[in-house]
Image (tube, helix red, strand yellow):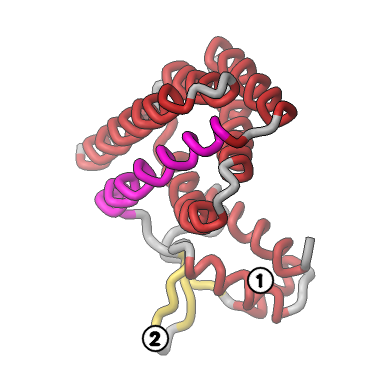
Amino acid sequence: MTLTDTAYQELEERIVTLKLRPGEHLSEGQLAEALAIGRTPVREALQRLAREGLIVVIPRRGIAVSEIDIKKQLELLKVRRELERLMVRLAAERASDTERKQFEDIAKGMRSAAKRKDDVAFMRLDRELNRLISETCRNEYAQRAMALTHGLSRRFWYVHYKQVLDLPRCAQLHAKLADAIEAERYREAAKASDQLIDYIEEFTRASLEASVY
C-alpha cells in the first residue's frame, strides 16, 4: 500500500464517520501533520476524494468536506441500481470456488448480524460484500464507476441509519444477494440486487422525511 493509499483510506474514513464534518474547511498542511504523512500523498488523496464527491474545491477559499444532499443521493441510487445489477450478474458467473465460499460466509454473517441487530458487524460485512462483488465481477470499468459511489453511500448510511434503518431486513437482503452469487444464480442475483436497491431507496426517502420533520 502506498502512502497515498494510506492517506486516502484514513481521510475517507474520517469523512464517512463524520470526524471531518460536512462543510468543514481542510488544510493540506494540517492534515499531513495529523496523519504524519507528507503533503504530496495527502494532496493526491484529496484529489481522489474530490473525484468521488467527498471533497469540494472552493475557488479562492481552498477545500472543504462536501455537504450531504438527500436528493442527490436518490440520483446516485439510479446509477448504483444499473451498475450493481450488472456487477452481481458478472460476479455470479465469474467467481471462483474460493470466492463463492467467501460469499457464503458473508451471507451467514449477515443473518447472524440481523438476529443480533449488530450494526458494527453489518457495516463491516457490507464493506466486504461490496469489495468482493467488485473483485469478482472482473470488469475494471464497472469497478471504477462503482468506486465513485461507495464513500458517499457509506457516509449517508452512517448519518441516517439510527433514525430509519431496519437493520434485520437490510441484512437479510444482503444475505439473499450473497446466496444467489454463491450459487451461480445470476438472474436471481440481479433480482436480489434490485430488491436491495429498492430498500435503500426506501431508506433514503424515509431519511428525507425524517430530516423535514
Q: Does the stretch in magenta take in 72?
A: yes
The residue located at (25%, 40%) in the rendering is 208
Q: Quadrant of the C terminus?
A: top left
Q: Residue furthest bottom?
A: 60
135 shown above or below 164: below
Locate residue 152, reporting x and y percent.
Answer: 45, 52
Circle 1 crowding by C-alpha within 10 Å: few under 14, some 14–19, many from 20: some
| 59 vs 197, nearest the viewer | 197
Residue 166: mark: none
Which residue is tagged 1? 31
Q: Residue furthest front?
A: 93
| 183 vs 102, nearest the viewer | 183
The residue located at (47%, 47%) in the rendering is 155
Locate residue 107, reporting x and y percent.
Answer: 59, 20
| 130 vs 120, nearest the viewer | 130
Secondary structure state at the residue bearing disc 1? helix
Q: Is residue 154 left or right of residue 108?
A: left
Which residue is tagged 2? 59
Give the residue type that dot 1 points to.
Leu
Which residues lie in the magenta part? 69-93
Locate residue 71, reporting x and y percent.
Answer: 25, 50
The answer to which of marks 1 and 2 sits earlier in the sequence is 1
Secondary structure state at the residue bearing disc 2? loop
Give the residue type that dot 2 points to.
Pro
The residue located at (78%, 66%) in the rendering is 2
